[in-house]
């Protein structure tokens, strides 16, 4: 396998609205991020995925763009964006921009033109269809944010298609002009020295609406190969596609280097395990470790030699990892460290979501409005109207609302958690006095320093980057264990996913092996005896001595 710089990279995702506010208006901004680059350098990450900072009416917090080549005033200026790219580069950190081109904002000049008349030159930049004879929407397709995916436009008497909010009209990627416009914009940003792109719902751009096909449409992969050839293909950058519909086989199509599409994709099979098959995330389902191990094992195996995995527990659309898969209470620190170790020794590129490195948790706000999320609000209204009780819906919100990930970052225990000197755009999670960066930096045993160690180890041990993955104890209901091997280098990783003591019989071929304890959340372990007693959420990785194996 041809090595790539991003094979041993660790990516840190920033949600700009909630990261750091430099001018005290309560909204995070680029100057705030620049002010925290030393903190990120200390953590050791070398790539920042920056959620959208482009001009936008913020109907979906920036995932509705009205100008791809300008910065939203509340986030800053183009000069500040260029400063961020330069200041990050000075610290060997590359910036990934968020490419949101499945749709634009309805305030984008393209759409403003397109809805003026049916023969406007921009009309075909979007997807328009005539109403049915009774004037109703062309078909029953739904928006991800609730309601129909079709919105009637009285001016021209036709419906336009939108898979997200009605203020996010979908672009018509069957139109070559749309492709050229986007390629031109991508090269404009690449010329500014960015490190690549995170691509929003990229599996949707090949849609064939008339056949009800949205993801994995017939034109998808040819569109990505054309995009690769016209933009980033010749540049040594990282591209990661958000593909909710990807299977391991499809992920190989995206990330097999010879196909010249993307570096990797975000797959969500391990995430939707805790969603109700019918109801989705609004009816949470208990986490089953064996199911999880099955999914992770499959992705590690199928992409072992072809393509590349991304590794993540959470992002700006998902609940906080420690609340979802760990224990946000008594064992918050132990379980957060366990989740980090369990993920960072896998094969692929790890992604850390802001606040994960200090163990930030979900939040229980009084009202759904407090979650400040178009999706949560849209689905709350739709499901209450459909007869779901407020209590049941709020359980879904507490568990899976995107708002849980978007509360402002906790920098210290001062007012507004040191995020801003002004009133934050969104309520702060009240546990900030206990959970914050200042406390974590001062405590050598903190979750923060645990992440630093994991990031350092990935740079020091090629076996973590390229080693073969071998699942262990697959049937064990509480323990996620696996081995990585590269030549005579072997690392064994053992994680207790439960808050109970676990008496563990090790597989015969691992008994009585000794090695170097690389990381642990209780005392170091450098011998694998016959039998192990694991503490609640205990987790450790050991590099086996080559002569003993
Ligand atoms: O998300 C795609 C998406 O489908 C998720 O929002 C999904 O709906 C959800 O969280 C799981 O139920 C991307 C962006 O990450 C998200 O923030 C945007 O809202 C969305 O696309 C539209 O751009
Ligand atoms: Ca601000």
Image (tube, rainbow, N blue to C red):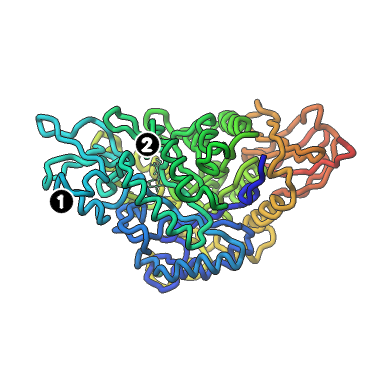
Is 373 displayed left or right of 147 in the figure? right
1 or 2: tag closer to the N-terminus: 1
Is 123 displayed left or right of 456 in the figure? left
In the image, what residue occupies the spot 54% across and 38% down?
A: 255
In the image, what residue occupies the spot 67% across and 43% down?
A: 345
Residue bearing mark 2: 206
Query: Ligand 2 quadrant?
Result: bottom left
Would you identify the image quadrant in which residue 300 lies?
Answer: top right
Q: Residues within 10 Å of mark 2 (few under 14, many from 20)?
A: many
For residue 35, the mark is none
In the image, what residue occupies the spot 25% across and 40% down?
A: 127
Query: Compared with residue 326, is residue 290 higher up or lower down, i.e. above or below?
Result: above
Residue bearing mark 1: 116
Which residue is at the far left? 134
Rendered location of residue 141, percent (x, y): 27, 32
Rendered location of residue 235, percent (x, y): 54, 52
Q: Quadrant of the C terminus?
A: top right
**Which secondary structure lies at badge 2?**
loop
Which residue is at the far right? 547
Rendered location of residue 214, percent (x, y): 35, 34
Is 119 displayed left or right of 496 in the figure? left
Q: Quadrant of the N terminus?
A: top right
């Amino acid at each position: 396998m041809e090595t790539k710089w991003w094979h041993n990279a660790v990516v840190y995702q920033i949600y700009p609205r909630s990261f750091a506010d430099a001018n005290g208006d309560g909204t995070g901004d680029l100057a705030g991020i620049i002010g925290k680059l030393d903190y990120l350098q200390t953590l050791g990450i070398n790539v920042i995925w920056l959620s959208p900072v482009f001009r936008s009416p913020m109907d979906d917090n920036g995932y509705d763009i009205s100008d791809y080549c300008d910065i939203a005033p509340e986030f800053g200026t183009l000069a500040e964006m260029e400063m961020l790219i330069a200041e990050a580069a000075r610290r060997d950190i590359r910036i990934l921009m968020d490419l949101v081109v499945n749709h634009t904002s309805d305030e984008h000049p393209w759409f403003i033109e397109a809805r003026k008349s049916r023969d406007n030159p921009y009309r075909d930049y979007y997807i328009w269809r005539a109403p049915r004879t009774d004037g109703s929407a062309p078909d029953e397709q739904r928006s991800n944010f609730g309601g129909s995916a079709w919105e009637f436009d009285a001016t021209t008497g036709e419906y336009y298609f939108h898979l997200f909010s009605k203020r996010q009209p979908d672009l018509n990627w069957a139109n070559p002009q749309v492709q050229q416009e986007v390629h031109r914009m991508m090269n404009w940003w690449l010329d500014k020295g960015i490190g690549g792109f995170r691509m929003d719902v990229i599996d949707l751009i090949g849609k064939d609406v008339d056949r009800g096909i949205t993801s994995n449409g017939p034109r998808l992969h040819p569109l990505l190969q054309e995009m690769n050839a016209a933009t980033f293909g010749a540049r040594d950058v990282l591209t990661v596609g958000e593909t909710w519909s990807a299977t391991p086989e499809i992920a190989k199509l995206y990330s097999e280097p010879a196909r010249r599409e993307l570096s990797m994709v975000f797959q969500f099979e391990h995430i939707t395990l805790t969603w109700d098959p019918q109801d989705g995330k609004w009816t949470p389902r208990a986490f089953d470790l064996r199911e999880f191990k099955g999914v992770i094992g499959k992705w590690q195996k199928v992409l072992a030699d072809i393509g590349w995995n991304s590794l993540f527990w959470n992002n700006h659309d998902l609940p906080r990892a420690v609340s979802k898969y760990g224990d946000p209470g008594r064992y918050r620190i132990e379980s957060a460290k366990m989740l980090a170790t369990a993920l960072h020794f896998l094969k692929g590129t790890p992604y850390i979501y802001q606040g994960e490195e200090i163990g930030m948790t979900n939040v229980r706000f009084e009202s759904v409005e407090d979650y400040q999320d178009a999706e949560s609000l849209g689905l709350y209204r739709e499901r209450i109207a459909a007869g779901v009780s407020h209590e049941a819906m709020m359980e879904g919100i507490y568990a899976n609302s995107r708002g849980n990930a978007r509360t402002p970052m906790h920098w210290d225990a001062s007012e507004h958690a040191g995020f801003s000197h002004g009133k934050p755009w969104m309520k702060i999670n009240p546990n900030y006095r206990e959970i914050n960066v200042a406390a974590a930096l001062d405590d050598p045993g903190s979750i923060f320093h645990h992440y630093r160690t994991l990031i350092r180890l990935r740079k020091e041990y090629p076996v973590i980057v390229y080693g073969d993955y071998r699942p262990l104890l697959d049937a064990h209901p509480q323990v996620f264990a696996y081995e990585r091997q590269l030549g005579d280098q072997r690392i064994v990783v053992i994680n207790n996913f439960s808050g109970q003591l676990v008496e563990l019989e090790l597989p015969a071929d691992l008994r009585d092996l000794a090695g170097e304890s690389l990381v642990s959340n209780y005392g170091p372990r450098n011998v694998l005896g016959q039998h192990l007693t694991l503490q609640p959420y205990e987790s450790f990785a050991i590099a086996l001595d080559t002569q003993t194996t």
